[in-house]
């Protein structure tokens, strides 16, 4: 009988639901923080980020965000810069902005007007100067 109660308790919990972000306040950067856009996923909670101060850094997802917030290529994030000179190219990902929050940051002037919000990895690669993968198909006129 005790196992049945445990099953009922476990099933009664709501899984996979987050509180709505609509009532949360917009988080702005402070000293030692910067806005960045994710360029590539490197695995093991690491990603290549381009910060809006012109630096390219290796972003590490902090432990409390792992398996709770899913970051994709092209997302706008808030990163915490490290104070060490040896780890100047590393940063910690503190917060993930939704598309609406990113647009609000751009409207407030926190992000540059040239920031590409909600872009896929291929769009970011083309914008960075790379070329899109060409297919070997040629279409003939009929």
Image: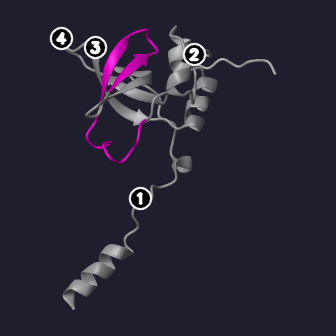
How far from the left and from the top, in percent, is residue 130? 50, 10
Of labels 3 and 1, earlier in sequence is 1
Q: CA distance from mark 2 to mark 4?
A: 29 Å
Instruction: Name the mark on residue 16.
Output: 1
Please identify, in this view, whether the residue under mark 3 or under mark 2 is nearer the observer.
3
Name the residue carrying label 3.
Answer: 89
Of labels 3 and 2, earlier in sequence is 3
- Judge left or right: residue 67 versus residue 101: left
How many numbered marks appear?
A: 4
Q: Label 3: how many residues lie within 10 Å, few (<14), some (14-19) or many (20+)?
A: some
Q: Point out the stretch of residues depicted in magenta.
A: 47-71
The residue lying toward the viewer, choosing from 33 and 124, is 124
Circles 1 and 2 in contact, beta carbons < 8 Å: no
Q: CA distance from mark 1 to mark 4?
A: 39 Å
Instruction: Name the mark on residue 114.
Output: none
Disc 2 secondary structure class: loop
Q: CA distance from mark 1 to mark 2?
A: 34 Å
Name the residue carrying label 2.
Answer: 112
Residue 120 drawn in magenta: no
Q: Quadrant of residue 103?
A: top right
How far from the left and from the top, in percent, is residue 53? 44, 11
Of labels 1 and 2, earlier in sequence is 1
Residue 66 drawn in magenta: yes
Name the residue carrying label 4.
Answer: 86
Q: How is the image coloured?
A: one colour
The C terminus lies in which quarter of the figure? Answer: top right
Q: State whether residue 68 is above or below residue 89.
A: below
């Amino acid at each position: 009988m005790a196992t049945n109660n445990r099953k009922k308790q476990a099933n009664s919990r709501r899984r996979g639901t987050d509180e709505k972000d609509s009532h949360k306040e917009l988080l702005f950067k402070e000293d030692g923080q910067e806005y960045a856009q994710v360029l590539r996923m490197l695995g093991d909670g690491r990603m290549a980020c381009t910060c809006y101060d012109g630096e390219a850094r290796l972003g590490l997802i902090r432990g409390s965000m792992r398996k709770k917030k899913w970051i994709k290529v092209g997302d706008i994030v808030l990163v915490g810069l490290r104070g060490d000179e040896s780890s100047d190219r590393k940063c910690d990902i503190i917060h993930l902005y939704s598309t609406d929050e990113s647009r609000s940051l751009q409207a407030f002037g926190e992000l540059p007007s040239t920031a590409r919000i909600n872009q896929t990895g291929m769009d970011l690669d083309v914008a960075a100067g790379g070329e899109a993968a060409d297919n070997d198909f040629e279409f003939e006129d009929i």
